Amino acid sequence: MKNIEKMTRLEILTIKLKTLKKEHRELDTKISELADLSSTDQFTLRLLKKNKLSLKDKISRLEDELTPDIIA
């Protein structure tokens, strides 16, 4: 049987963080594009902004988990 490398928890969290940041940037771009259109559905725009905020919260939690607390 082959020796399969397992990813560490830190590596998994780092990849997840990068993915969430990418999604956040893409959502930001989409929101900006829709906001520039005069015929934009406000409900859709509000929903996208809510999703973007949710992603930001997830990113913050992951960054907190990856960054150890240092008590001075």
Image (spheres, rainbow, N blue to C red):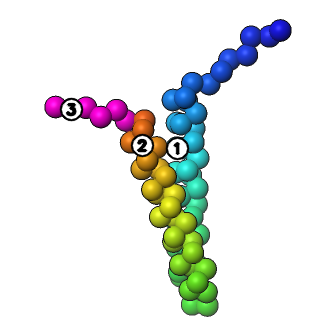
Question: Is any part of residue 38 visible from this angle?
Answer: yes
Q: Amino acid at mark 2?
A: Glu
Q: Residue at x 21, y 32 (%)?
A: 71
**Distance CA(mark 3)–CA(mark 1):** 24 Å
Q: Mark 2 near mark 1, Cβ–Cβ under 8 Å?
A: yes
| Towards the viewer: 37 or 51 | 51
Q: Amino acid at mark 3?
A: Ile
Is residue 66 shown left or right of residue 50? left
Q: Position of residue 8 (x, y in %)?
A: 57, 24
Q: Position of residue 37 (x, y in %)?
A: 58, 85
**Distance CA(mark 2)–CA(mark 3):** 17 Å
Question: What is the crowding at mark 2: few (fewer than 14 residues within 10 Å), some, or many (at least 20)?
Answer: some
Identify the disc placed on residue 71: 3
Is residue 62 shown left or right of residue 27? left
Looking at marks 3 and 1 on the same chain, the residue that comes earlier in the sequence is marked by 1
Q: Please state which of the two labelled residues, at mark 2 or mark 3, is closer to the viewer.
A: 3
Q: Quadrant of residue 45?
A: bottom right
Q: Position of residue 35 (x, y in %)?
A: 53, 80
Is residue 64 shown left or right of residue 11? left
Q: Position of residue 21 (x, y in %)?
A: 52, 51
**Distance CA(mark 2)–CA(mark 1):** 7 Å
Magenta stretch in the rendered image: 67-72
Q: Residue at x 57, y 75 (%)?
A: 47
Q: Please state which of the two labelled residues, at mark 3 or mark 1, is closer to the viewer.
A: 3
Q: Mark 3 near mark 1, Cβ–Cβ under 8 Å?
A: no
Q: Residue at x 52, y 43 (%)?
A: 17
Identify the disc placed on residue 17: 1
Identify the disc placed on residue 63: 2
Per the image, label 1 sits on a secondary structure element best described as helix
Looking at marks 2 and 1 on the same chain, the residue that comes earlier in the sequence is marked by 1
Q: Is residue 48 above or below residue 58?
A: below
